[in-house]
């Protein structure tokens, strides 16, 4: 087996793709498929003993796990460090720290997510090619609830490989066979001679040894960390208020920037009428028009920059969307459901849905649902810090989900300024929430443009909350029409789903990739509608792309965030039409799905389904399979006679496959449910005259502690490999709440948000169902 | 020049008196624990204690706190680094997700427990108006009760 390139050599040569492609031509793909170029080799880097791409031991003995996924609250740094520590036989204590690696090694790429495979199961030429191409492009990102799925196995192997290298180093030092050695608590021990050497002592020697061909992984029966709750590695610093976020980056000589984007998406800067006056404001150094689209103020303090930006008198160009309002966009969606816009894309066609639905002898049911645009509203407002030096080198510090996006943002922004960069170094800081918003390159590009204008000085750009809420990107405004024909037992003989939405994938890829894909057949707007787990003999799923001027982004759980609301509400409507209990109805539909059935039964059990409830209270249930996990929730909702609605409790059961850190999964369920409750009851971005109406938390409100439901989470034991956990938590929540409102009141609500948020005092709101709600 | 006490130490800040306390803390004193989240006193990520009272620092001018004693998240732990009972409860309950809003919660809860050492759930609901987008509220509630119990024992 050829020796692996060191990670530094690997980067410097940049020859991995070309080189291996050349060898592939000579040696054949079959051989190379077994050659590991993903970074299991070690090297010395100053005082650091680099054992492989995922593990470094510092000269002070500290164990640094390189986790190439963004920590944005989901606990991924902890979960993946646990996996390495498990294989290293290390207790999970303060000796371990986690860093987001600066060098974009191929081992860190999202090839597995991109190819939709698990690394431990993947082989063959397509996988080989995908790994190399995506790895070489530095395609690193955090999303799609995929981090554990993608990295838990490679990082186990990295831990096991490093352990073996440490043992080999100890065997050489002690002059004993490696078979006589054991490990524990950060030491390699030779029991017979009662000698032991610490990992720290062994690290430099170990780093120069060849990695084992096939490191032996610890059997599950010997796990001491995986599956047992561990404390998050990032929490002590956060609880002390240490500066870990992008917004906290402070660099010598740093300038600060505030920004204004066009209210109507797509408008250009016509003129800044009072540029001279704004430039004369205290502390202001620059007023810059960025790419003809935005206006930034650069100052010696963000507060001064933002104050000056308030004064900007910008004339924006007119656009074709200047007269667009939300109701008109709703009409377009409904027209698309009615047939406008050409043939829909057919995602699924099983059996003969059309003729079953057209059969006049079978009872049919049809319903149309809708959701509005929503914003991410991460607690940490968007920001990026960039320096472009005179030698053309650039460095960026960004709370980002994607160093790939940071890099392309720097290239884009410096390109707007006509500056060529010689190198780009990306630092991914902690993110104060992300939810899909921080994968885009937009903020970095703006900061890079400003940095290129102020060469040699770092520029930190912060969007105000108003820019964050109102200036994009959004989860789409979408609608769907669902139909079913019910058989004699009340179960669907046929199920037909048509969704109308702007394509998410086209919007996101068009901004961030060097090509713009077709908007038709976007799986992201169809996910959550297929209901493949339900036993329905005839099934059809179609989508229709409805373009708009509003920029979309990926948003926590994408299509599931609305389609599961649509489809699981509709299943409830079918159950009601059949006169059956919603739980029993789903049990019947899941009769061939033991995994789903177990989750459904678990949530029913912990929720006490069927038990008596106080007056005005109802229970609703929903289930979904998403991100290779199965999740079900039961919501208990009270609707008062005056319409005030309270989500009292939400019960949640999840089969997320093998769970690394159960407490982190529980936290994601709790948080996802609160996030989902906010979305179901409160969240709407409204378009008026082409622009967003909402601007901050007073009109884009959030659940506060007084509103938040109690949450009970149950995690099922599972024999499957890890599934996703970051997004599933919010997926069934809106449907469960809507179904509970129906149970409590008999009113079927088919549009989000369910409620109107009334302000009752300072930072006080209540959610009230509108009297004239659709379907009442 | 505005003189005040921050985390026990007297400071003179040369920023304009109408600068929000939040930005004076972050930019002039380098105290980055208090966070900018909304700028309109809605979210509470910027909360600090002003003479013991939980105050959104984004919506109070530096000049208004002249002579006051301000405590930020950085001032909650003891000088030897020991976490305050509220911080320790936050760690024990593994409260934060992203953690960005938590300095404001820790300050608000510190003030709450100073005036009401054993708040009921209803009193917590009444007192806490901070926003957490990650949705850590169930753990925040547990951590408050834990901190209250811990302080009662101490």
Image (cartoon, grey):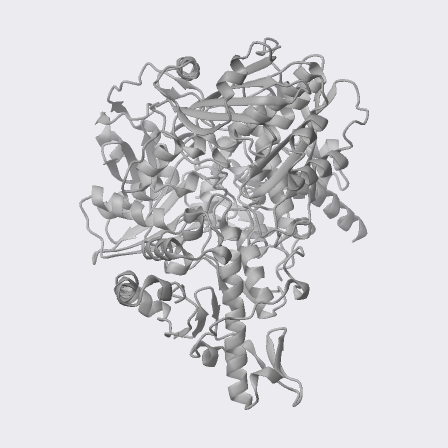
Single out the residue that lies furthest toward the left.
A418
What is the x, y in percent for residue A740? 68, 23
Find residue A558 and report its horizontal and vertical position in percent: 48, 34
Q: Is B151 placed left or right of A34 in the picture? A: right
Give coordinates of residue A160: x percent, y percent: 54, 69
Q: Quadrant of the N terminus of chain A?
A: bottom left
Q: Residue A179, how many percent across, how many down?
A: 59, 82
In the figure, B30 relative to A209: above or below?
above
Corner quadrant of residue A708: top right
The residue at the point 39 percent across, 37 percent down is A463
The answer to whether residue A319 shows anywhere in this view is yes
Given residues A50 and A218, the one toward you in this image is A218
Q: Is residue A388 above or below residue A536?
A: below
Image height check: is A661 above or below A44?
Answer: above
Does A177 appear above or below A491?
below
The residue lying toward the viewer, choosing from A705 and A687, is A687
Which residue: 25% across, 64% down?
A: A22
Instruction: Describe residue A534's horizontal placement relative to residue B35 as left or right.
Output: right
Kindly indicate the quadrant of the structure image that contains residue A25: bottom left
**A480 and B16: which one is in front?**
A480
Q: In the rendered image, which quarter contains the C terminus of chain A?
A: top right
Which one is nearer the viewer's eye here, A165 or A277? A165
């Amino acid at each position: 087996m050829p020796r692996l390139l060191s990670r530094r050599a690997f980067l410097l040569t940049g020859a991995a793709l070309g080189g291996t492609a050349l060898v592939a031509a000579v040696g054949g793909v079959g051989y190379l498929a077994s050659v590991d170029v993903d970074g299991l080799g070690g090297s010395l880097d100053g005082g650091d003993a680099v054992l492989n791409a995922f593990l470094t031991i510092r000269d002070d003995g500290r164990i640094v796990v390189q986790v190439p996924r963004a920590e944005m609250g989901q606990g991924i740094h902890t979960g993946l460090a646990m996996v390495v520590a498990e294989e290293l036989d290390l207790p999970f204590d303060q000796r371990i720290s986690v860093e987001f690696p600066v060098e974009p090694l191929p081992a860190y790429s999202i090839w597995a997510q991109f190819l939709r495979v698990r690394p431990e199961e993947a082989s063959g030429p397509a996988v080989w090619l995908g790994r190399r191409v995506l790895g070489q492009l530095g395609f690193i990102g955090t999303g799609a609830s995929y981090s554990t799925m993608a990295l838990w196995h490679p990082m186990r192997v990295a831990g096991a490989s490093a352990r073996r290298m440490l043992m080999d180093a100890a065997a050489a030092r002690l002059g004993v066979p490696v078979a006589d050695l054991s490990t524990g608590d950060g030491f390699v021990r030779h029991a017979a001679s009662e000698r032991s050497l610490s990992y720290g002592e062994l690290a430099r020697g170990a780093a120069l040894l060849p990695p084992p061909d096939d490191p032996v992984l610890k059997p599950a029966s010997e796990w001491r960390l995986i599956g047992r709750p561990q404390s998050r590695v990032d929490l002590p610093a956060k609880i002390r208020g240490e500066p870990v976020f992008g917004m906290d980056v402070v660099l010598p000589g740093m300038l600060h920037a505030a920004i204004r984007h066009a209210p109507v998406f797509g408008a250009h800067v016509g003129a800044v009428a009072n540029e001279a006056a704004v430039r004369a404001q205290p502390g202001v150094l620059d007023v810059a028009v960025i790419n003809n689209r935005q206006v930034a103020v650069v100052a010696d303090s963000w507060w001064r920059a933002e104050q000056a930006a308030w004064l900007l008198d910008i004339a924006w160009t007119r656009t074709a969307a200047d007269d667009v309002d939300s109701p008109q966009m709703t009409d377009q969606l409904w027209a698309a459901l009615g047939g406008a816009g050409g043939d829909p894309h057919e995602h699924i066609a099983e059996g003969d849905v059309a003729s079953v639905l057209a059969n006049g002898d079978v009872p049919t049911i049809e319903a149309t649902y809708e959701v509005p645009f929503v914003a991410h509203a991460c607690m940490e407002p968007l920001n990026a810090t960039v320096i472009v030096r005179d030698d053309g080198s650039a460095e960026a510090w960004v709370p980002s989900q994607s160093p790939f996006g940071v890099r392309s943002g720097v290239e884009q922004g410096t390109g707007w300024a006509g500056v060529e960069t010689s190198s780009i170094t990306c630092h991914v800081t902690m993110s104060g929430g992300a939810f899909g918003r921080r994968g885009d390159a937009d903020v970095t590009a703006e900061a890079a443009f400003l940095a290129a204008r102020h060469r040699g000085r770092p520029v930190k750009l912060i969007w105000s909350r108003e820019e964050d809420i109102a200036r994009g990107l959004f989860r789409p405004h979408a609608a769907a029409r669902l139909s079913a024909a019910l058989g004699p037992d009340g179960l669907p003989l046929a199920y037909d789903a048509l969704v109308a939405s702007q394509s998410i994938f086209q919007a996101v890829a068009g901004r961030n990739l060097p090509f713009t894909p077709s908007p038709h057949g976007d799986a992201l707007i169809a996910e959550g509608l297929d209901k493949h787990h339900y036993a329905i003999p005839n099934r059809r799923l179609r989508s229709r792309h409805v373009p708009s001027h509003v920029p979309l982004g990926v948003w926590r759980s994408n299509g599931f965030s609305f389609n599961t609301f649509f489809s699981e509400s509709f299943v409830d409507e079918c159950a009601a039409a059949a006169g059956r209990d919603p739980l029993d109805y789903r049990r019947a539909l899941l009769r061939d799905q033991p995994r789903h059935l177990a989750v459904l039964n678990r949530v029913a059990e912990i929720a006490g389904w069927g038990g008596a409830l106080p007056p005005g209270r109802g229970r609703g249930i929903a289930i979904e399979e998403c991100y290779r996990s199965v999740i079900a929730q039961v919501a208990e909702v009270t609707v008062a006679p005056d319409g005030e609605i309270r989500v009292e409790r939400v019960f949640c059961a999840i089969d997320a496959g093998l769970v690394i850190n159960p407490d982190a999964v529980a936290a994601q369920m709790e948080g996802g449910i609160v996030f989902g409750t906010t979305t179901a009851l409160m969240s709407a971005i409204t378009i008026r005259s082409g622009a967003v109406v909402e601007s901050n938390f007073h009109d884009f409100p959030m659940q506060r502690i007084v509103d938040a439901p109690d949450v009970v989470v149950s995690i099922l034991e599972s024999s499957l490999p890890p599934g996703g956990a970051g997004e599933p938590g919010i997926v069934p929540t809106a449907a469960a709440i809507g179904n509970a409102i129906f149970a409590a009141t008999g009113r079927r609500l088919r549009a989000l948000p369910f409620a109107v948020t009334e302000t009752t005092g300072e930072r006080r709101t209540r959610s009230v169902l509108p009297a004239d709600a659709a379907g009442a | 020049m505005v003189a005040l006490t921050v985390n026990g130490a007297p400071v003179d800040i040369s920023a304009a008196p109408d600068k929000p306390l939040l930005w004076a803390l972050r930019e002039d004193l380098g105290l980055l624990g208090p966070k900018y989240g909304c700028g309109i006193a809605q979210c509470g990520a910027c909360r600090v204690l002003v003479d013991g009272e939980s105050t959104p620092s984004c919506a109070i001018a530096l000049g208004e706190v002249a002579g006051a004693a301000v405590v930020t998240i950085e001032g909650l732990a003891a000088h030897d680094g020991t976490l305050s009972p509220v911080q320790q409860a936050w760690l024990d309950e593994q409260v934060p997700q992203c953690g960005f809003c938590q300095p404001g919660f820790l300050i608000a809860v510190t003030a709450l427990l100073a005036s009401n050492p054993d708040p009921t759930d209803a009193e917590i609901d009444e007192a806490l108006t901070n926003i957490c987008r990650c949705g850590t509220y169930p753990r925040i509630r547990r951590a408050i009760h834990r901190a209250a119990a811990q302080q009662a024992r101490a």
